[in-house]
Amino acid sequence: MLKPVGLFFVLSVLLVSCTVSFAQTGTSSITGTIRDSNGAAVPGATVTARNDATGVVSTQTTTESGLYSFASLPVGKYTITIEKQGFKTLQKTNNTLQVGEPLSVDGTVEIGQVSETVTIIEGPEQLQNSNATIGNVVEQKAIEALPLNGRNPLTLLLLEPGVVQRSFGGAGSGVHVNGARDRAYNVTIDGIEANESSVPNPVSNLYRITPDNIQEYKVTTNNATAEEGRNSGASISIATRAGTSEFHGTGFFFLRNEALNSNEWYQNAQKTPKPLIRLNQFGYEMSGPIIKKKTFFFGSYGYNRVDFTQPIDQTFGFPTVYTSQARAGNFRYFAPDPTCNTSTGAGNCLRINGVIVARNGSTPLVNPSTGAYVPGIHDCVGAETNCIRTYSTQANNGKGLALDSVFAGLLKSYPLPNNFVGAGDGLNTATFAWNPPTGGSWSGD
């Protein structure tokens, strides 16, 4: 009997196999002209294109002008073979077809027997002369080898020429291509539109993609062709991976934990505990043939578990809470000497670090970390001035009633302050700085 995890593994692979195997539309084309050694066109020649990874073969016959065209082929490496009676068989290998990048493979056949074969090993195409688009293909090797925070392969778009990213806090996505608006782009996955309409982002899309399920993608930054064009910014054409004639499978696990990190300098300065950072990423991918040279499957599964903390002041500001004395109904205030003129400094004025103290909050009266009085501040004795007096709600309510128990319980549910500067007067109210936990998990296939 399959355990739940094993059953889920099998079902996920089968489900992805069924959906991916029959929906491959992220293609490109191979065209060319076949001539003889005298430069004349060779009509009626049989041209085959074999996918080296899957073994799938497509066949064309050259026209009267010696032309052939494979209009829609999955990306990958191909072997092109030209055969015609009276000529030697010409075989050109190592032809790399990339998404959205038409490939031109011409051939010159020599007179001879078909049984004789001339093999030419092709290198990368030096000049793309099929169109005038400006862009780049991000290959699977780069996607797998380059560091990706969050394992989103589309973030490599930010490394393309002409692409800039606005600093944090700007409206929109902040990603601009050649000066275009940050929402002027088009994303397709296997030829199908995958744009998020409400809050579009060129480094995101409607579906979860990972380095495991992407074969490659093309970024066109200028002069997009008709099939790519839609907006004035980038056109991003994504081709997903497909199965091959051999079975393959890999698994991975990535860990990030605060136990492996030191505390940040500002966290130490504020005596704030080390923030929680726990990132667990794991998954697998599997591929292989269902029917040799005909039907293949590819499936991937990824799971992210993220738990982290972020200083709450980055979003909400420091929350203000009551000090322990105020919770008990004892409110403190500074009692200045009536002879002190705060405008001129004449009279009996109390100065802390050269600043005249006029009232609560006019200058820090307590230690910012502990809440204890700073030197020069003390509780009043009798009719003394330039000191701290306390007003007790229980002693002054006429009946000596203590604080209502329900309200007192509510106050105790709040944390005590740990930061006595920035908000509040430090005597009755102060702030509580903390790192609230934030978590999330997601998966993709």
Image (cartoon, grey):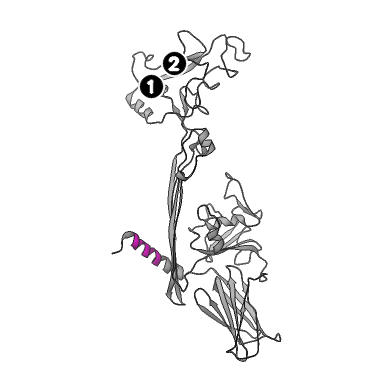
**Secondary structure of the residue carrying numbered label 2:** strand
Image x and y of residue 169, in percent? 57, 44
Q: Can you identify the residue that label 1 sits on?
A: 328
Instruction: Give the residue at x 41% y 21%.
Output: 325
For marks 2 and 1, give the CA distance: 12 Å
Span colored in magenta:
5-14
User: Which quadrant is home to the N terminus?
Assistant: bottom left
Label 1, residues with CA under 10 Å away: few <14, some 14-19, many ≥20: some
**Secondary structure of the residue carrying numbered label 1:** loop
Residue nearest the viewer, comparing 206 with 291: 291
Residue nearest the viewer, comparing 19 with 295: 295
N-terminal label among 2 and 1: 1
Q: Disc 2 residue type?
A: Thr
Is 14 placed above or below 71 here? above
Q: Can you identify the residue that label 2 sits on?
A: 390
Q: In the figure, residue 102 lies in which quadrant?
A: bottom right
Type of secondary structure dominating the magenta stretch = helix
Asked if the stretch drawn in magenta spans residue 259, the answer is no
Q: Disc 1 residue type?
A: Ala
